[in-house]
Amino acid sequence: MPDTQTVDLRSDTVTRPGDAMYDAMRSAPVGDDVYGEDETVNRLERIAAALLDKEAALFTSSATQANLIAMLVHNARGEEVLCGDCYHVFVAEAGGASTLGGVVVHPLPTAEDGSLTREQVLGAIKEDDPHHPITRTLSLENTVSGRVQDPARQRDLVDAVREQGLRSHLDGARLMNAAIATGLSAADIAAPFDSVMLCLSKGLGSPVGALLCGSAAFIERARRQRKQLGGGMRQAGVLAACGLYALEHNVERLADDHARAARLAAGLVAIDGLAVRHATNMVFVEPAADDVAALREHVEARGVLIGTQKPPLRLVTHLDVDDDGIERAIDAFRSFYRH
Ligand SMILES: *Cc1c(COP(=O)(O)O)cnc(C)c1O
């Protein structure tokens, strides 16, 4: 069980299953999912497809794998994906689409709020000329480092590139945070996109897994692609059970994570010399460069773990951080600046 002495704010990936989730794993009916015989995986895929209002869904071992599968299905070798230069697909997936799929990724400068403009995206579509890769896909993200992206603006971009024959993918690792923050349904946010990835092991609190959703034809190809990547799992129902539990119990409560992040930001912004930014379940603090190492050491000595090596420092709220943990984190920061 989580060490109650530690307030782990490094990421929302650090949550551990509780007793109820373990119970769900233990009682899940399972079978060989490569044969399509795992009832629990099948149920999770059906529920996810319905949730995002897509025809079909595929359970994958990770969100990175789901994004990679989407990139490999949408794009052939020498074809190109447009995305933001801070988006996970470009910066945090070890170049998988390029190294494994020969896919060109064209990163566009992302605005402070995490968005791209219509002009940028349309301007990056290459002409049909043997010098150029063939621009095939636009890949967007929601949330972008916690920042909710306006679904209407995303729809506008997707509609504009679709007219040029492009496909679209949404990296919705934290799509549910965006849904809870806006009050919109996940299906509404996902609607414009050909494919959507939803991560189960971030704020939703599963130990493993993500879902890739799209048309039945897309998911059929994605299933073969997953197998090719070694991602075909057998009695995966024990893991899918966690995903089902997470979708049932851990979506609405994301509002608590957002409220705790807001409380944390309010506590930290009161400290002189600390620039603070809050978005959904994330808080970013920018201490003076000279303070960073000492500050990290100081708060860690008080059991508060914070993310990223370079400023801004990232603090992320999740299932395993309660109100008391937030107050302890604020106190740890305050005591550093008091001396
Ligand atoms: C975390 C994350 C992923 C990948 O998740 P993994 O579980 O690390 O594979 C993809 N996209 C975004 C936006 C993420 O934050």
Image (cartoon, rainbow, N blue to C red):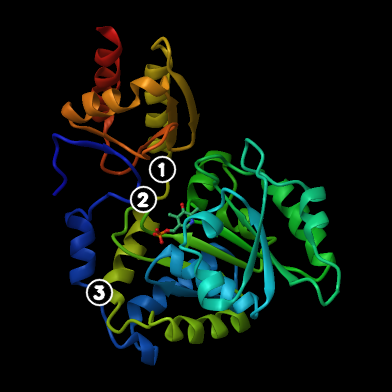
Which image quadrant is residue 311 in?
A: top left
Mark with earlier residue (2, 3) = 3
Residue under pointer 1: 254
Is residue 276 positioned above or below 53 on the image? above
For label 3, the SS is loop
Residue at position x 80%, y 62% in the image: 125
Q: Nearer the viewer, residue 267 or 80?
A: 80
**Foreground residue among 68 and 23:** 68
Q: Are marks 1 and 2 in contact (CB under 8 Å)?
A: yes
Instruction: Please rate how many residues cluster around mark 3, counting C-alpha atoms within 10 Å: few if below 14, some from 14 to 19, many from 20.
Output: many
Dividing the image into four quarters, tell me where ligand 1 lies. Answer: bottom left
Q: Tell me residue 159's x, y (percent).
A: 79, 59
- Residue with the mark numbered 3: 28
> Position of 241 compared to 22: left or right?
right
Q: Percent from the top left, x then y, of residue 219?
A: 55, 80
Front residue of this view, candidates 41 and 162: 162
The type of residue carrying mark 1 is Leu
| Label 2 packing within 10 angstroms: few (<14), some (14-19), many (20+) | some
- To which residue does mark 2 refer? 250
